[in-house]
Image (cartoon, coloured by chain):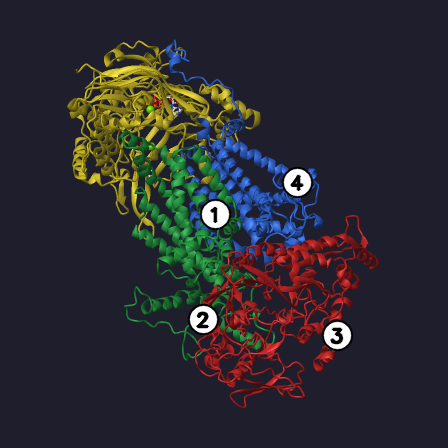
Amino acid sequence: MTDPMPNTPLNALQDPEITQPARSQWRDVWDQFKHHKGALLGGGFLIFVTLAVLFGDMIWQIDPKKLDIRNKDVRPIYTAIWNSDAKVSWGNPLGTDNLGRDQLAQVIAGGRASMAVGWAAMILTMLIGTTIGVLAGFFKRLDGPLMRFTDLVLSLPILPLLLVAVTLFRQPLRANFGPEMGMFILIVGVIGVTSWMQAARIVRGDILALKEREFVLAARAAGTTSRGIIFRHLLPNVLSPLMVSATLGLATAIITESALSFLGVGFPSDFPTWGKMLADAVPRMQEYPERVMLPGLMISLTVLSVNYLGDGLRDALDPRIRGR
Amino acid sequence: MLTYTIRRLVLSVPTLLFIALIIFLLLQLAPGDPMAQVPLTVPPEVKQKMREALGLGQPIHVQFWKWLVQMFWIEPQVFIDWLTNKSALFGWLPDTNLYTACGPTVEGPCDLRVISWQTRSPVMDIVVQRLPQTLWVVGMAYVVGILIAIPIGIYSAYRQYSVFDQAGTFITMIGFSIPPFFTGPLLIVIFSVQLGWFPFIYDTTHVVDDWDSFVFQLQQMLMPVMVLALQTTAQISRFMRASMLDNLNQDYVRTARAKGLSEAIVVMIHVLRNSMIPVVTVIALGVPAIFGGAIITEVVFSVNGIGQLLITALFANDLPMVLTITFMFAVLIVLFNLIADILYGLLDPRIRYD
Amino acid sequence: ERGSDGHVGVIYWQAPSILSPYLSGGTKDIEASSLVIEPLGRFDENGNMVPFLAREIPTIENGGVAEDLTSITWKLKEGLVWSDGTPFTSADVKFTADYCMHPEGGCAQLSKFEGVESIETPDDLTVVINFKRPQPYPYSAFMGAQSPIIQKAQYENCMGAKAQECTDANFGPIGTGPFMVEEFKPNDVIQYVANPNYRDPAKPAFATLTLKGGGDATGAGRAVMETGEYDIAWNLQLAPDVLAKMEEGGMGKAESAFGTLVERIEMNMTDPSPDLPEGERATVAHPHPILSDIRVRKALSMAIDRELLTEIGYGQAGTPTCNLVPAPEIYASDNTDCLVQDIDGANALLDEAGWTMGSDGVRTKDGMRLSLLYQTSTNAVRQDFQALIKQWWEEIGVETELRNVNASVFFGGDPGSPDTFQKFYADVEMYANNFDGADPQPYLAQYRCGNEPKPSSQWAGENINRFCDPAYDAMIDELAATGELEARAALAKKMNDMLTKDTYTIVPLVNRGRVTGVSNTLGGFKHSTWDSLLWNAADWYRTE
Amino acid sequence: MLDQPIATIEKLRVEFQTKDGPVVGVEDVSFDIKPGETVCIVGESGSGKSVSSLSLMRLVEYGGGEIAGGRLLFNRREGDEIDLAKTDQGLMRTIRGNEIGMIFQEPMTALNPVFTVGRQLTEGLRLHMGMNRKQAEARALELLNQVRIPEAERRLKQYPHELSGGMRQRVVIAMALACEPRLLIADEPTTALDVTIQAEILALVDRLKRETGTAVMFITHDMAVVAQMADRVVVMYRGNKVEEGTVEEIFENPQHDYTKALLSAVPRLGEMTGKDLPEPMKLLGVEGHRTDPIPGSEDVLLEVRNLTTRFPVKGGFFRRTVANVHAVEDVSFSIRKGRTLSLVGESGCGKSTVGRSILRLVEPQEGHVTLGGVDIIALGHDGLQKARADMQMVFQDPFASLNPQMQLMDQVAEPLRNYHVVKGKELQDRVAQLFDRVELPRSFLRRFPHELSGGQRQRVAIARALALNPKLIVADEAVSALDVSVQAQVLNLMMELQAELGLSYLFISHDMAVVERVSHDVGVMYLGRIVEMGPRRAVFEDPRHPYTRALMKAVPIADPHRRKSEKELNFKPIPSPMHPVDYEPAPSEYEEVSPGHFILTTDSGY
Ligand SMILES: Nc1ncnc2c1ncn2[C@@H]1O[C@H](COP(=O)(O)OP(=O)(O)OP(=O)(O)O)[C@@H](O)[C@H]1O
Ligand SMILES: Nc1ncnc2c1ncn2[C@@H]1O[C@H](COP(=O)(O)OP(=O)(O)OP(=O)(O)O)[C@@H](O)[C@H]1O
Ligand SMILES: [Mg+2]
Ligand SMILES: [Mg+2]
């Protein structure tokens, strides 16, 4: 494994030629990403869950809202292993709830709502947070006012805001988008409006530091406008910290929605979400532990995989790590 | 440093006033009428009179001004009176009597405190009543969470990607993602129902005066504290780990090792001290949240702290209560932001504020 | 012996916020204050009147009630003292009435004193109440937990508008009851100690009582039946299987007692459409486009399987009913037609009404979809009911949108909120209601034309459905003038039927028992649904 | 006994386990160090110098490395010899800092920012020498005096950031010397420092070696430093030792190709003596490039008059300006077409600020800047953007000045896009031509900065600066971060471009040897002012201003026969450029000592 000794002084001074062919950035990101087992698993799980909640109802066609009182309190199929008397049925592999709704169908439908809330709220959070963070970090004049504004929003409790929003906007939203979509917009909106502050602070901090970096100065010297600097140079560089807070944001949005369901200010009662399934199952968790486990596990695993995915993406997107 | 602190404090006054105004306006938007509970039979003129007694029906800016006066002028007077008359610490001071309560027997000028619409009693009194349990349970949970989180964070970072690190990440994330309305009942079923070890209805009237009552206090605190601490632990340990990782690769760590210092000293003194700087500020920033952020846990264990007070007030349309509590949160947030900044300056000699 | 049994704990998952029934209509507040202040007489577990501060219940037979029903004379027990040791006199009783009837006081129990013209106190032990008109049921004032006697000395300066400012009195009333307030933490907990001046020297058996508020019904049930931390848990509206599981804990029982509490669906007779201008929405100006047709209402009722609802939601603690007034016996109509579910019949009825089934399973008529918004308060059992009923209604081609509102808001009565049950910005809504005491007259009188919640009355009013029928109004007046019990009962049944099976304005579902968790070691607890749950706290004792 | 080496490295091999499999840090290195001797390890960046030294300390393990083979024999104080490669970490701890001291490269980060200097100094003493606190403090004080830190007593209580870079590096040295180690490893101890401070530190290490007889292993990539310090030299190349010999042997008679090439690339102060014009370096083995002098023209391109730039310092309760940093004070000069003006001076004297003020990347307070007849200072926002097309900038750190997230193609195309010069296919061609120009393969177009070496990155930066055909390029320390060999190539490239395109450079540097090589004219800056300015030859061969003289003296010369003695060094600390708001500095006045050669006659603060 010895390097060929340079036979001429010329070679001695040349940099070792890069031999691999040029690769696209995304290929590179993927290569780095591949090394992170947790991220791969997390990403895989997330894709699986997303596909499952999106298309699961095509395969498992039972209506999640359909009540079947005769078939209530069916245990999941695997309980038969240790308890041969258990009421199980292949028609409801994961059992049914106290009104005979199929749990599998509910998990699928609930996941769709939870994931949609999570993603939408996260994207909204990131949009607001990034905009405010960039403006505050880049334009010195805006920094003070925007940061005070951030303090202000931080001190607003989410619950009163939601209640106010519900009373003010539910009617028009319901009229325009229907009860479920209207509530969805409302919840996503409120979560988005009350949780962007963390992202804004992170972005602002990073922008403040990046702004002093030489490549920004170089871009400015090359005649790039502020707009160009923000979009071409700064934003791509705050991507990896943003990624982390985005993944956390997704997780908190899912959890916040479930807390709202628990407090009874969320979706209509027959509209399943993981949070509501969990909340509904809590009083019977001794007799039917699977009913809390199922949505609980889904929430936890999703959050966990999102977190791992975020870790992996951060590593993959950070050129300092990728470069070495 | 002192100038900086004073400057920030002075600057925070307009910020707070502004925040108060925004909250006030926001709550005005919210529907709510304190006269909702008054029966129909009361004639409208009387209702109007009652409204006026509560300061309603006046133009918004007058109402706001009135609230400000009550909050910043009258309540402090009450507090000073209490300090000089009743409190153990300052009771030796000559008794003051700045505040004259309006009451059925009082003639002449009197001061009206911020009155809750729901209970018709001063808001501040109720808030003060709620402080002990909030601090015992929610505050303690924060402390416990931090105490658990920091060692976990340190060790996870020191042995990055080890089994401990992976398991720690896994467990803390699970802890982070499981809502308290599940963990709470779970603990209750296990520890109260099955094992019968702890009571789960929090007794807010319990007074700690001897060892036994202290033990009881610990028992009744344990479960809510555990539920809440789980979340704190999850978050702080992530921060701690990240911060440690940042510092473990610094040049000064190599210098310390080159001096022949043992690993324990290198990690626990050189690295930890630096890593704590950002974490301490994160911890300070989290303090305001503990006062309001535990609503669900408070409901599950009937702790009835400030979070529960806020939510009942909200549902009962008790505007003065909501306004006061939210404003107190805002004060805490602004204050702890300042504290976090000052702590940063104190902990990190490189930062100088002047 | 007084105080020998130590401590007793009561848990209410709604926390009392004030200790005066005159300033708050909330059950939690009324019942919490019932331990301290007492009325002249109460209703026992069977709905019978028992004298408390009065020597006996005045009747026409014993001469207490005037023949012409225009006055009632109460004789007070001798030697009664307030907990502070001062004597209890008829002046206190008269003061109580003056306090509540003060026009500026905002008294929440003013209806109890309706029709009262004057109160005389010929001597310290006699109270005479004169009515404006003959009062066939003269027991509304000073009977039951809603109108206890407060101490004149304590409240003298709290008349009228000042009532609100008397925090000390409102938080710590002086009473004649078995307990006195030691510490009151609003919305949290109340500590009581035995009243040293209680009239029966051997009672109460408990030296202290804690009334803890807050948490949720599940927690409250658990604390009594599974961990035994508390002795009484109030109002456990939990699914029967959940309650049964809790009873397995072995520390207590879920006791249910039936009264007049009926879980029902109310049909909105007016149009709640948001397209209407604010102020006209859900008012009598616009009849409901769908529900005005009695056939639709009837079909909706026929589609419901009340047996199943009861089994799922209440088990032993409920019976299916078709009546608005299910008790007392003599007032209960024998109406049982609704108990059998009839989907086909309902479908036929809707066909007949001109609602044709669409391809998506929803009926339409003249381009209008048979689509209803169904609201109720947030509560696990109610949500189960909603889901079940929605399913049945879908089977008859009715599209249903569900909504649940936080109970505090739903029943909060706030005219600013669009979500109160009075505003009824929905097509149908579900809740439970009952009447105090044993006389249904005021209850039935609620459905008078004009008594509906409307903008001009700040959305207050009890005629929730906006029902209006002159014939019914006439019966209300007739009932008010009838003194004879049989005739009253017949009239009341007729009125009940009119609201339920004749018009399907109110669709009763379940006659709900009140479920209370009671510790196995608590003796003497008598479950009355007619009065405060804690009405006989003086008689409680510890077994074993 | 004296001849017996203190440390012997035999066939050392170090591997790093990385995600992409094992990486060999050091492949095969053997040499020894005798007491009282300075062995210099040279080699370009990444050749394994640091890894070798860290292996000797057994610190590589903490960086993820592993000693895969070889022996590291060390003679302990008690006289027994042990193999450090096999010693356990417990025993190592008693050796580290005690018998082997180490000085690290970066004085800014080698000290823990949150502990006082005193605490960090005494830590090792208390551990190894068993001293109590008092004794340790006394010894620390003694050490600080030994390394000539003024006001040593006060320094002990200060935090690292309160000390200047030079002082910090001295503290690190004091720390390494604390327990009187028998072997001192200095890993590039002066790379980050100013020439003057560097000279002092070198002298200090040399003196310590002489006085205490410590063996020194001195790692550097700077051949001039080697010439000043070494007794023996070990040359490393890509993980291997390629040559070893006494310092004279290496300099006079290098055997290995790499050593030869390296020496040919080193600019030596004095090489240009007698020449008026700059000329590209002759690089060994690089055939066919011209090394003709570059004449330039006489037309003035850039005219700077009385440029003053100050940075406000805010403070007090109302955040008002309480003082100003006088970064640039009354500076005037001009640059002719096709010529290079160099600005030299110590760190913080305002060189960069001059460059940035000309492009108005910072706003100057006063003064006139005219570029080809355009008054830059008077321009509005749009005009300025247009004007910047004529003047471009190349920054110091090739890594920092390229956006890590952008492909090189886009980075070079950015100025073209900004000015809408060309579009589409044409744009790509243009960028490709620019790559050819700076001798980068076109296959690099789609790469990212991290995939390139430092020299290649700097070429990209130059290509970007060239994109708009500017008339002036401000090269702010454009080669300081590069290895000598790479530096020589980049310098040659710049000079070739100048010869071909008639570019003018404002060349900012603190490296006198480089400046001597490239400039037509030189300005020496001190504390915001130009203290001496004139044709390069005049300034270098006949420095008049006392500061210029001191600076020249401090520059190490890459010739082992011209070592400097410590006595010649005598520097004053630079005074602070911060002044209260009402401070009104006097204007600069110059005296022309020979044609075009001016020196400052008014007070410069030196
Ligand atoms: N922690 C590490 N992980 C992986 N590879 C490493 C690590 N440290 C050093 N290397 C590799 O070992 C080789 C030698 O590095 P070393 O730091 O010794 O170079 P150097 O000669 O000191 O360079 P410089 O002059 O830049 O300090 C390099 O190729 C480098 O990539
Ligand atoms: N943005 C700024 N704000 C405040 N002070 C500044 C700023 N930029 C530079 N200075 C100060 O101006 C002085 C000159 O700085 P400048 O960067 O021009 O020095 P330099 O000669 O380029 O130094 P170096 O060789 O270290 O790059 C220094 O004292 C520096 O601290
Ligand atoms: Mg190195
Ligand atoms: Mg500079």
- Identify residue type, mark 2: Gly
- Identify residue type, mark 4: Pro
User: Which SS class for mark 2?
Assistant: loop
Chain identifier for the yellow-coloured part of the image: D
Q: Is residue C502 left or right of residue C176?
A: right
Which chain does tag 3 point to? C
Q: How crowded is the residue under tag 2: few (<14 C-alpha within 10 Å), some, or many (20+)? A: some
Residue C239 percent coordinates (x, y): 62, 56
Q: CA distance from mark 4 to mark 1?
A: 43 Å
Reading the chain from its start, which is encountered first: label 2 or label 3? Answer: 2
Q: Quadrant of residue A264?
A: bottom right
Which chain does tag 2 point to? C
Reading the chain from its start, which is encountered first: label 4 or label 1? Answer: 4
- Residue at numbered disc 2: C3
Which marked residue is nearer to the observer: mark 2 or mark 3? Answer: 2
- Residue at numbered disc 3: C472
Query: Relative to D248, does residue C197 appear above or below in the rendering?
Result: below
Decide which of A243, B118 is in the foreground and name it. B118
Q: CA distance from mark 1 to mark 3?
A: 60 Å
Q: Which tint is chain A?
A: blue
Q: CA distance from mark 4 to mark 2?
A: 58 Å
Q: Quadrant of residue D516?
A: top left
Decide which of C205, A295 is in the foreground and name it. C205
Which chain does tag 4 point to? A
- Residue at numbered disc 1: A197
Asked if ligand 2 lies within 8 A of label 3, the reply is no
